[in-house]
Image (cartoon, helix red, strand yellow):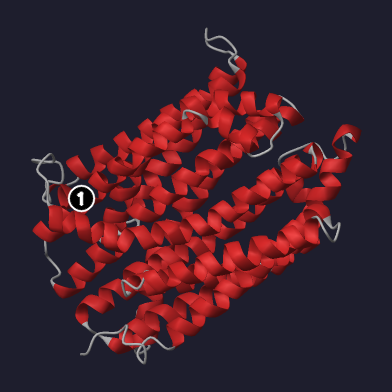
Amino acid sequence: MDHDGNPETPWRTEAQALLSLALPLVLGNLGWSAIAATDLLLLGRLGPDAVAAGSLALNLHQAFLVFGIGLTTAASPLIASERGRRLHSVRDIRRTVRQTIWAAAMFCLPAWAVLWHSEAILVLLGQDPELSAQAAQLVQSLQWGLLPYFVFLVLRNYVSALERPMWGVIVTLATVPFNALAGYVLIFGHLGFPAMGLHGAGLAGLLTSIFMGLGMALVVSLHRVFRRYRLFGRFWVPDWPRLQTVWKIGLPIAITVGCEVTVFNAAVFLMGLIGRAPLAAHAVAVQIAALCFMVPMGIGQAATVRVGYAHGRRDRAAIGRAGWLALGVGTAFAACTATLLISAPRFLIGGFIDVDLPANAQVVDFAVSFLAIAALFQLVDAAQAIGAGALRGLQDTRVPMIFAAMGYWVIGIGTGILLAFPMKMDGVGIWLGLATGLGVVAVMLVWRWSRRERLGLVPAA
């Protein structure tokens, strides 16, 4: 019975568990998105060229960042499944956390080497040489924050899989004002520091990542629930079988997430070929769409944990409830955000640039048209994120990776290039291509989830 005297049902119980886990994860995602939005707002005060250069820099950096995000996501289904199998497991959970950090550190080495040559890479991709040089100032400082940020992510996934996600939220929300202050001081020159422009933005991003990594390390070391796992004791000792498992689960997730996010990065570079105004408008529109996406993303993360927990218990009915509830809640929210994007685009754009300034008129017009298309793909974007999250709970990551590669890069970017250039639709064509790719991937993932038992993805009871 619940507090009102009504009988509890499995669906009601699962809905409560899903929402209690998803809401903090959504808050954490919104906090991170607020950090990214703050960076864009600060760069916007430097002018349209700084926004364009910052967009190039952040998108190149993001290609490596999201790969690491996907790799570290492996910790969630592995820990959740272990807790479902044995609720008070300590050793196996500790092994997973340690080796996920090891895997992230292994990835950082080649990532740092590539990002150090960001200016040459951007010029090779056909970007404006002046903007490429400015972008490199940001990337070559920002890149060193990859490892501390990945440590934060692993530890956030750890506390979330233990169904105590609020600690990740607390650290993220504490980071928002820290990032704003660091950016304000280093970009514009305050409190005795010189104005460093884009280079200062990169240093602020590095300090922000260190702040987040250290914050989560302190939480798991000091909190009584987490410290019994002794995550950092004998951290240097390798565990090759578990490291292999992390790569086996995490690499396909990394490629899947990478395919999704880098297709938006590719869109940035294609926008750069069209012009500076479409590039700046794309940066603003993507940031707004990303804010909307934080809720389905959090629900998908919660679905991974809830499905993974049921997977560890070998409870087929609970697996189905966790996945279908997450899909229903996420798509319902996406319908609301689609309505907002269509009904109030100029209001949303005004949060990033002055919509009444004549110099920004062309950027605003492009951004309004991009948001209209973004409204169309809210539902499919939510469905693909949550569908992928539910399948990750079943540790099913390889086939979704193939779906993502085909849908985003073959269909999505192929359609976008066709519409933008041969058919002369420019930036609108690129966004229509993105929407098409998201729709195809969403259909394939939900189809696979609906056939999970026939495909042998669910263990026998």
State the residue position of label 1.
Answer: 99
x then y, percent, for residue 252: 38, 62
**In the structure shown, which secondary structural element does the residue marked by tag 1 occupy?**
helix
Q: Nearer the viewer, residue 369 or 143?
A: 143
With 452 as the anchor, is 81 left or right in this view?
Answer: left
- Residue 208 visible from this viewpoint: no
Amino acid residing under circle 1: Gln
x then y, percent, for residue 25: 42, 57
The residue sitting at 75% across, 46% down in the picture is 349
Looking at the image, residue 269 lies above or below residue 123: below
x then y, percent, for residue 317: 32, 89
The residue sitting at 39% across, 48% down in the picture is 68
Q: Quadrant of residue 448?
A: bottom left
Q: As drawn, which residue projects farthest toward the right?
A: 358
Q: Nearer the viewer, residue 6 or 9?
A: 9
With 324 as the anchor, is 157 left or right in this view?
Answer: left
With 93 as the anchor, is 139 left or right in this view?
Answer: right
x then y, percent, for residue 281: 76, 44
Q: Quadrant of residue 449?
A: bottom left
The residue sitting at 17% across, 57% down in the picture is 242
- Residue 455 visible from this viewpoint: yes
In the picture, which quadrant includes the N terminus?
bottom left
Q: Nearer the viewer, residue 178 or 245?
A: 245
- The crowd level at tag 1 (other Cα within 10 Å; few <14, some 14-19, many 20+) is many
